[in-house]
Image (cartoon, coloured by chain):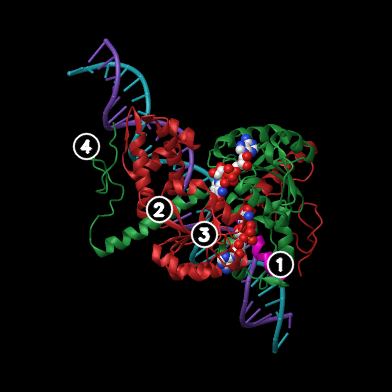
Chain colours: A green, B red, C cyan, D purple
DNA sequence: CCATCTTTGTGCACGCGTTCACAAAGACAT
DNA sequence: ATGTCTTTGTGAACGCGTGCACAAAGATGG
């Protein structure tokens, strides 16, 4: 997973568990595909398969929204698309600003799937004066000086940060001060925000590292299967004084 | 959060909880910053603040790796950097292929933080013949025909998919067949993979929808505070026959 | 060598999320 | 109208993750 909520710990928002909220977009995508194929109804089993989840989980998720299914038949696709869209707040228009129009920011601006679901790129903002006025994805880049004005004039409440890590917190502070209350952060930094502001992060580097961990573990298991070396050593306890890098690997640095 | 593991349900890999693994890169980043500032030791409280987590959680996380701290002092920064790096498998080189060199793929290829932690872009692959040979981020793009050969020759086990959604499953199947066992998917699709292959996804659209949900809820709470209208209706039960869009909103479609 | 002070490592309790399994609901045929 | 068959909605059990709170460990000073 590339994200994690930062604030609002476990405040079951309006009775819908956070884990369920995170899956609703997944269901919505699968339902939209069915809708485009004019499929009228779908069972929890079928939809769960399409969304890659357990069918019981899907039914429980839907039960938080209300009783929208028909026993013996399944769920009405169009109706469910509407209900989930409404629940997620996609029936209204969400203006979004993207700050930092470099490689990533430009890619995001060009991303088609952005506009498809109620999200509209209200402005592209960059600190580089030489970029000002230059159109990216058909939208002229504006200078950071305009940030506050843009946000207030357009009533922007969602901001995307795609600046270098060093600038992220500062940009975040300005966004929040100007009225933004939801931030999607692509910079590899922990953002500090006041209560009431939601931050989600997308971090490529972290994702790769998690994959590497599992990849290493897979390789390790094979090695263990080959030769019977290196006992798993779960919950290993430290030796009294002598401490040599736990798994027989040579540590580069020793503790003080 | 933008991701979620797909396979390998909750198999506490080698005793380290998945939630802990997901935080290790965060700690590593904070520790690396301390290391660059030549800070010798750090307490769980300080490091937790830098990583944006609870200090008890951090200590528990580290306890899964072993007893690497010194009571009354804290943790040795360099030693911990090494231990976490080793645990995550970052002491070795991970060749990575990126498939689909469009807007996003090109941005990823240009991403500096990629190479910084043991990850090396082994190849850029695209189906568009007109892109073949064209250098992106200094690496010539290769045609999809070469995919299997590249993966086998370089021993690539991690693949990044940045193709359009329609091509993602097909690309995934080819990657897996050629030997890739970890996939980072940027395309908005659920990928089906055989047992033993890890998939993580990064989905901008899902992140925005989750933010929109919370944003709507915040707005709704304010509205409720203004006028005492619309009771929260937690766990609402369906009316027998008449069903009008639960929150007084007009449904576009009614169930069959 | 002892006292004090800091900070780790973890036992414990609690709550969230997942999954099983099944009763109840409704469609549909006869 | 009644019976059968399908599928929902959910009660209950379980396991994981989180955070509190504290004992034990060790540093440091006298
Ligand atoms: N490119 C990727 O694939 C990728 C992947 C993961 C994470 N990231 C992260 O995303 C961020 C952007 O990456 P990139 O490759 O697009 O970098 P980039 O250098 O190409 O672009 C950064 C842009 O931000 C602008 N900028 C700098 N400071 C600013 C400020 N204070 N206010 C507004 N704009 C400012 C710069 O002018 C530049 O245009 C970085 O933090 C990077 O670590 C990038
Ligand atoms: N651009 C973004 O910010 C963004 C954000 C989120 C998700 N995404 C997703 O990432 C993917 C890529 O987005 P993009 O904006 O770069 O699209 P794009 O159209 O610019 O690039 C797609 C590239 O994939 C190549 N391609 C197509 N089929 C292929 C195949 N079978 N094998 C190899 N290469 C193939 C195309 O030639 C093209 O170069 C899409 O699925 C998109 O939904 C993009």
Determine whether B193 is above or below A186 in the image: below
A239 or C16, which is in the foreground? A239
Callout 3 environment at 10 Å: few (<14), some (14 to 19), or many (20+)? some
Q: Earlier in the sequence, mark 4 or mark 1?
A: 1
Examine the image and state in which quarter residue A75 appears: bottom right
**Residue B238 in sight here:** no
* Residue tagged 4: A240
Kindly report the distance in space between the C-alpha atoms of the residues bearing marks 4 and 1.
63 Å
The numbered disc on residue B169 is none
Q: Which residue is mark 3?
A: B140
In terms of secondary structure, where does tag 1 sit?
A: helix
Disc 1 designates what residue?
A77
Foreground of the two, A250 or A164: A164
User: Is ligand 1 within 8 Å of the beta carbon of the residue shown at mark 4?
Assistant: no
Magenta highlight on residue A33? yes
The magenta-colored residue range is A23-36
Counting residues from the start of the chain, the first of labels 2 and 4 encountered is 2
User: Quick check: do tags 2 and 4 share a chain?
Assistant: yes
Is residue A227 or residue A64 the one in the foreground? A227
Nearer the observer, disc 2 or disc 4? 2
Q: Whole-Å distance between the Cαs marked 2 and 1?
A: 40 Å
Residue B196 located left or right of residue B104: left
Label 2 sits on residue: A213
């Amino acid at each position: 997973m590339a994200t994690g909520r930062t604030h609002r710990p476990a405040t079951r928002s309006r009775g819908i568990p956070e884990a369920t909220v995170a899956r609703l977009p997944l269901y919505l995508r699968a339902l939209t595909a069915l809708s485009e194929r004019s499929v009228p109804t779908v069972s929890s089993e079928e939809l769960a398969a399409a969304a890659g989840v357990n069918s019981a989980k899907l039914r429980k998720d839907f039960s938080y929204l209300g009783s929208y299914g028909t026993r013996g038949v399944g769920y009405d696709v169009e109706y469910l698309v509407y209900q989930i869209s409404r629940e997620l707040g996609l029936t209204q228009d969400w203006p979004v600003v993207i700050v930092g129009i470099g490689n990533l920011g430009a890619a995001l601006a060009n991303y088609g799937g952005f506009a498809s679901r109620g999200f509209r790129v209200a402005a592209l903002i960059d600190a580089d004066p030489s970029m000002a006025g230059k159109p990216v994805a058909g939208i002229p880049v504006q200078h950071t000086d305009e940030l506050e004005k843009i946000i207030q004039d357009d009533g922007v409440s969602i901001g995307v940060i795609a600046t270098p890590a060093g600038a992220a917190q500062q940009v975040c502070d300005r966004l929040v001060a100007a009225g933004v209350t939801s931030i999607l952060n692509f910079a590899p930094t922990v953002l500090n925000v006041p209560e009431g502001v939601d931050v989600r992060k997308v971090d490529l580097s972290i994702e790769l590292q998690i994959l590497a961990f599992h990849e290493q573990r897979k390789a390790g298991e094979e090695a263990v299967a080959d030769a019977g070396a290196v006992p798993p050593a779960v919950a290993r306890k430290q030796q009294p004084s002598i401490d040599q890098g736990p798994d027989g690997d040579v540590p580069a640095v020793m503790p003080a």
